[in-house]
Amino acid sequence: MKRAMRRQLWLLIAVIVLLAAAWWQLRNDQASAPGTLLPLKPEKITRATLQMGNASSEHYEKRGEHWWRTDQTTSTHADDRRVEELVRIAAAPVQSWQPTNSYDLAKIGLAPPQAKLELDDETLHFGTATAIGHNVYVQAGDRIGIVSLRYMPRSAQSQSIQAQ
């Protein structure tokens, strides 16, 4: 075998080994990732209710391709982009999960919560910002996750955030 051919063969083997190592690392990272706040797919959500502090609840329902703000007697067309921002919170990546009993809920703003977001039959309670970083505590069932502060819900009556 010529020297050039051997060199190309070793180079090909090195590339295959590097690709296999990269694939293994990617699979390992995905397996150890904490996941998202809720198992729901944002595009499948059809109902959303937002309670900010002591303010009255905002109820939304998806009809066809559009969101409607509903109350007991009337319904009006809602800002679709703004409500879509709310439902995308379901897919917020969680940095870490801890059991609820690991925290004093009052100290992290979850007793009472700063905000409550119901998406279909799932409920998220939002607490205060963490001491370090731009993150917020979120209770989902019997777990508390830490997510980026950008996922803290805002009233759907406020202006939507432009896509970044």
Image (spheres, rainbow, N blue to C red):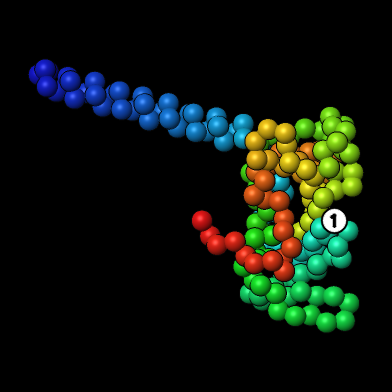
Q: Residue at x 65, y 56 (%)?
A: 88
Quarter holding residue 109: top right
Q: Position of residue 18 (x, y in %)?
A: 36, 26
Left or right: 12 in relation to 84:
left
Pick the quarter of the image with the N terminus.
top left
Q: Position of residue 40 (x, y in %)?
A: 70, 54
Left or right: 60 in relation to 35:
right
User: Can you say whether 67 is above or below 43 in the image?
Assistant: below
Q: Residue at x 11, y 17 (%)?
A: 3
Q: Residue at x 30, y 23 (%)?
A: 14
Q: Position of residue 83 (x, y in %)?
A: 68, 66
Q: What amino acid type should be assigned to the residue bearing mark 1?
A: Gly
Tell me the residue that label 1 is attached to: 53
- 64 vs 86, nearest the viewer: 86
User: Can residue 101 be seen from the camera position used here?
Assistant: yes
Within-10-Å neighbours for mark 1: few <14, some 14–19, many 20+: few
- 158 vs 74, nearest the viewer: 158
User: Can you say whether 102 is above or below 106 in the image?
Assistant: above
Left or right: 50 in relation to 40:
right
